[in-house]
Image: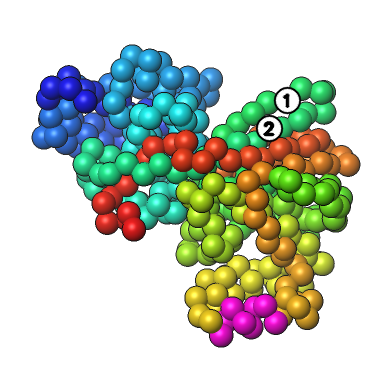
Amino acid sequence: MGAAGSRWAAVVYNPVKIDIGALRPIVELTAVAEGWGETRWVATSVDDPGAGLTRVLVAAGAGLVMAAGGDGTVRSVAEALVGTGVPLGILPSGTGNLLARNLDLPLSDVSRSVATAFRGVTRNIDIGEARIARGDGSTDAHAFLVMAGVGIDAQIMANTNPALKRAVGWLAYVDAGLRAIPASRPFRVRYRLQGHNEHSAHVSTVIVGNCGLLPGGIELLPGASVDDGLLDIAVLQPKGIVGWFQVWRRVSWQNRALRRFSIGRQIIEANARGGAGKTITYLRSSGVTIGLDEPNEVELDGDDFGSGTAVAFSTRPSALAVRVPLASIR
C-alpha cells in the first residue's frame, strides 16, 4: 500500500455509544506502531449513520475504515464499502454486535479489536441486500450483514424501549417480545426461492440470514455461513403460546446442542417427520422474494426499516472485505 506512513485509516464512530477519548489513543498508538499515517475521525449522525461518510473517506483514499458503534453503524459503514476492496475493521459496541459474534471477533477488548483491524487478515464475506416495496409504489434497497426479517421480529425491533435497551441491552428485546407475541396474529405471505415456484403460507415471521448466531450462543439459523454465497431462511409458523415455546426449544436446545451430534440430528429429523418441527421450516437459496397481502414491518440487522408490501432478498457473494484474526481463518 505504499511507503510507511503514506497509507491512512479512518474511524467512523457513533458518538452516542463510543467514548472517543478512550478509543482515540489506542487507535493512534497502534497506527503509529504499524506504520500508518494519521487516522481520520468522523462522527455519525441521524442524517448520516455512516454510509455517506464512508463513501467520502474511500474516495479520499482510505486504506482501512473502522466502524465503532453498534450493529447499525457497522451495517451502514459496510454498505458503503461493498465492492471497493477497502477492508472493514469492526470496533464493536452496543447491544448485539452480531457480525462480530459470527466472525469470532473480540467483543469487549478494545485493544484487541483495534489490533485486529490493523494487523489481522482480510476475509471476504457475503453481504445481503433487501429491496423493499412500499405502499406508495416506491422501492428502496438496503444492505444487511447478519439477519433481516418480516413480521413479528420486525415489530419487536420497532417497539423495543430505547431507554430499557440502553439499561439492560439485549434483554430489552425479550421485554418487547413478551408484549408483542400474545397480540400477534399470523399473516399470509407468498414466497419464491430463486429458480423455484411460488408458495404461500400463514406465518408469524420470515427471517432471512447471512449468518445465524445470536447472543447467548443461540443458533437461530443452523449451518448458515457468512461466505457460502447463500441466504438461510427460517419460516416461523407457531400456533399460540405453546407454538412459541416450541420455537424457543428448537433454537435454544435443538439447534445449539442436539445438532452437534449425529444421534441428535437423527432425533431432530424424526421429530420433523412426525410434525413436531413444523413450527420452523428452514430453507436455503441465493435469493427469496416475499409478497404480502397487507403491509408489514421489516427489520435489517435489528433496525426498524418501516413497512413494506413486498421484499426481495438477495446476496452478493464475497463482496465485503473484513479484518479478522488470523486464528479465525480455517
Residue 28 sits above or below residue 210 on the image? above
Q: Identify the image's colour scheme: rainbow, by chain, secondary structure or one colour.
A: rainbow
The residues colored magenta run 263-270
Report the residue at 82% width, 67% height from top: 239
Nearer the N terminus, badge 1 or badge 2? 2
Residues at discs 1 and 2 in contact (Cβ within 8 Å): yes
Element type at marker 1?
strand
Q: Is residue 167 visible?
A: no
Report the residue at 68% width, 68% height from top: 247
Kindly identify which residue carries mark 1: 139
Within 10 Å of the Cα at label 1, are there few (<14), some (14-19), or many (20+) other Cα atoms? some
- How far across and how far down the image is residue 163, in percent? 54, 43
Residue 321 sits above or below residue 137 on the image? below
Could you give the CA–CA distance between mark 1 and mark 2, rounded to whole angstroms? 7 Å
- How far across and how far down the image is residue 144, in percent? 56, 39
Kindly identify which residue carries mark 2: 131
Within 10 Å of the Cα at label 2, are there few (<14), some (14-19), or many (20+) other Cα atoms? some
Q: Residue furthest bottom?
A: 263
Chief secondary structure of the magenta span?
A: helix
